[in-house]
């Protein structure tokens, strides 16, 4: 098979997706075609209002804007692919089972601080998950608005940036509290198995439900998946991981907000795919 035939065969394997909205560059609107092969981007074409390939410089600017919009929700996309909707389901189940951790007479002086920190982490998890569920609905509405109007308006860029900052801030707080109490979950499970025969029946049943929920095959698995995405949250940010959790969360909020507002896409990363 000739090189030309090989290239033609490869092109036949490509799928073409025309974005349902235009990107504005210097008061001109451009459509973008994304070519994918086996789920990965293999090419990008930027078209002017006549449907012809735009000049290269305009194409690069349009792709850079698309990169910026995708950057806002990169973490959300990755998390959705990894966790699905299980994070929200787990939050609801924690709400139903965590009350037993408020029993200060059950665990003893040695175990109580471990339980208190775990209880706080679960409360943070629930609160931040509730926020993220709301933000995710707002992001979906924003994307639908952009699709219906066929373009990204100036106010949409501001909304996307604000929603990205809000979502990432909630995700970071949730994640670092989960990471800090991973051992606490294991210690509570160990304590329960060693002491369950001495625990009153009602308390044993209630705590057993929570231990089962937090196990490595249930919520524990989802927690670990969320924790595994921490490097994506902290990427390109200067965060002191030795700070206390509240301060660390505040520093992230400041760092990410600044990073988000001054973000410059790596155009060279996508330049090889542009076919203009």
Image (cartoon, grey):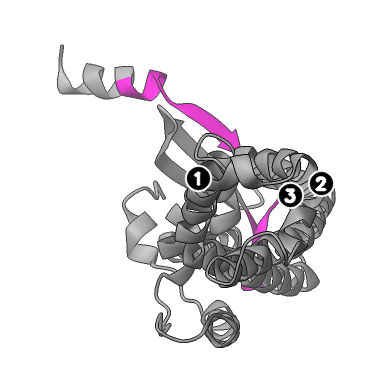
Question: Disc 3 vs disc 1: which is toward the camera?
Answer: 1
Q: Residue 96, percent across and down? A: 81, 46
Q: Where does label 3 land, which residue?
A: 94
Q: Residues within 10 Å of mark 1 (few under 14, many from 20)?
A: few
Q: Residue at point 69% right, 46% down?
A: 207
Q: Residue at x 76, y 70 (%)?
A: 159
Residue 242 seen in the figure:
yes
How many numbered markers are drawn?
3
Q: Residue visible at 54% across and 40% down?
A: 215
Q: CA distance from mark 3 to mark 1?
A: 23 Å
Quick check: 275 left or right of 206?
A: left
Q: Position of residue 141 (x, y in %)?
A: 83, 53
Alpha carbon separation for disc pair 2 and 1: 24 Å
| Residue 96 disc label | 2
Q: x, y percentage for residue 208? A: 66, 40
Q: Dot 1 corresponds to which residue?
A: 194
Pointers 2 and 3 in contact (C-beta within 8 Å): yes
Looking at the image, is mark 3 or mark 1 earlier in the sequence? 3
- In the image, residue 210 lies in the stretch drawn in magenta: no
* Residue 23, magenta (yes or no): yes
Q: CA distance from mark 2 to mark 3?
A: 5 Å
Can residue 78 be seen? Answer: no
Magenta stretch, residue numbers: 10-30
Asked whether the residues under the numbered discs 2 and 1 touch, taking CB atoms below 8 Å apart as contact, a structural biologist would say no
Q: Quadrant of the N terminus?
A: top left
Task: Looking at the picture, tell me which residue is in the foreground, 23 or 123.
Answer: 123
């Amino acid at each position: 098979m000739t090189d030309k035939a090989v290239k033609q065969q490869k092109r036949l394997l490509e799928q073409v997706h025309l974005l349902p909205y235009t990107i504005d560059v210097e008061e001109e609107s451009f459509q973008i075609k994304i070519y994918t092969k086996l789920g990965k981007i293999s090419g990008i074409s930027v078209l002017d209002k006549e449907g012809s390939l735009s000049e290269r410089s305009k194409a690069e600017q349009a792709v850079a804007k698309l990169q910026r919009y995708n950057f806002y929700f990169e973490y959300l996309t990755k998390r959705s692919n990894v966790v699905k909707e299980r994070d929200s389901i787990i939050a609801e189940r924690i709400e139903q089972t965590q009350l037993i951790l408020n029993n200060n007479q059950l665990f003893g002086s040695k175990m109580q601080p471990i339980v208190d920190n775990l209880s706080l982490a679960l409360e943070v998890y629930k609160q931040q998950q509730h926020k993220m569920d709301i933000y995710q609905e707002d992001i979906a509405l924003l994307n639908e608005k952009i699709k219906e109007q066929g373009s990204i308006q100036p106010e949409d860029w501001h909304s996307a940036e604000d929603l990205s900052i809000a979502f990432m801030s909630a995700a970071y707080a949730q994640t670092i509290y989960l990471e800090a109490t991973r051992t606490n979950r294991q210690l509570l499970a160990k304590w329960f198995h060693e002491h369950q025969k001495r625990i009153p029946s009602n308390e044993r049943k209630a705590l057993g439900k929570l231990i089962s929920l937090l196990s490595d095959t249930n919520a524990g698995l989802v927690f670990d998946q969320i924790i595994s995405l921490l490097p994506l949250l902290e990427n390109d940010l200067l965060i002191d991981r030795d700070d206390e959790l509240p301060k660390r969360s505040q520093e992230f909020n400041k760092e990410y907000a600044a990073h988000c507002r001054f973000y410059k896409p790596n155009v060279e990363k996508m330049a090889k795919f542009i076919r203009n």
